[in-house]
Amino acid sequence: MDNRSMIVNQTHLSFLDQLVKDSRPFESCAILLGKCDKGQYFVQEIIPTQNEESSEIRFTIDDNRLFEIYKLADDKNMSVIGIFHSHPSLPFPSETDKVYMKINPVPWIIKSTTTNEMRCFISEDQKNGNENNMISEIEIKVRD
Ligand SMILES: [Zn+2]
């Protein structure tokens, strides 16, 4: 871990808990809106998104819906700062996740529906000619 962090409050945590419960048995997903300043990602709003796959092991978000969310963020003067989804296993990125994390290099929060543990990861950009898909973990901080 480094000095980057994903900052959420108790309301966000309860919201995500409920979202996971409501989506069962499928994977749930949501887009996190907020602001990013010097590696500190402040969540301000969470937009739940329908899992187009109705799958227990993977998720897809409709392109039009994603476009709407980017526009909504823009209207609210926020940015898309993260992507949330749940796993019916441990909260680590799957091989498929890693591919999409590279395409969407924002922090990804994964919540395990088996252990309830939540972790956050980001795909690093490949500046130094590093062809490997480098994934770093980011600390999740809960305030108030
Ligand atoms: Zn996943």
Image (cartoon, rainbow, N blue to C red):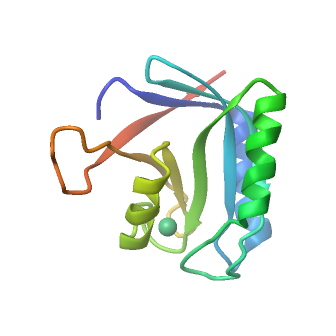
Whether residue 110 is situated above or below residue 51 in the rendered picture? above
Residue 84 on image: x %, y %: 60, 53
* Quadrant housing residue 5: top left
Residue 67 on image: x %, y %: 75, 52
* Quadrant housing residue 133: bottom left
* Quadrant housing residue 136: top left
The one of 67 and 34 positioned closer to us in this rendering: 67
16 sits to left or right of 2: right
Residue at coordinates 49% horizontally, 54% vertically from top-left? Answer: 117
Whether residue 47 is situated above or below residue 92 in the rendered picture? above
52 sits to left or right of 91: right
Residue at coordinates 40% horizontally, 65% vertically from top-left? Answer: 99
Image quarter (top left, top right, bottom left or bottom right) of the N terminus: top left
Q: Is residue 18 visible?
A: no
Residue at coordinates 29% horizontally, 29% vertically from top-left? Answer: 2
Give the farthest residue toward the left. 129
Image quarter (top left, top right, bottom left or bottom right) of the C terminus: top right
Whether residue 96 is situated above or below residue 128 in the rendered picture? below
7 sits to left or right of 92: right
Residue 106 on image: x %, y %: 49, 42
94 sits to left or right of 62: left
Whether residue 72 is situated above or below residue 26 in the rendered picture? above
Residue 25 on image: x %, y %: 69, 80
Q: Is residue 1 visible?
A: yes
The one of 70 and 144 positioned closer to us in this rendering: 70
Residue at coordinates 42% horizontally, 72% vertically from top-left? Answer: 96
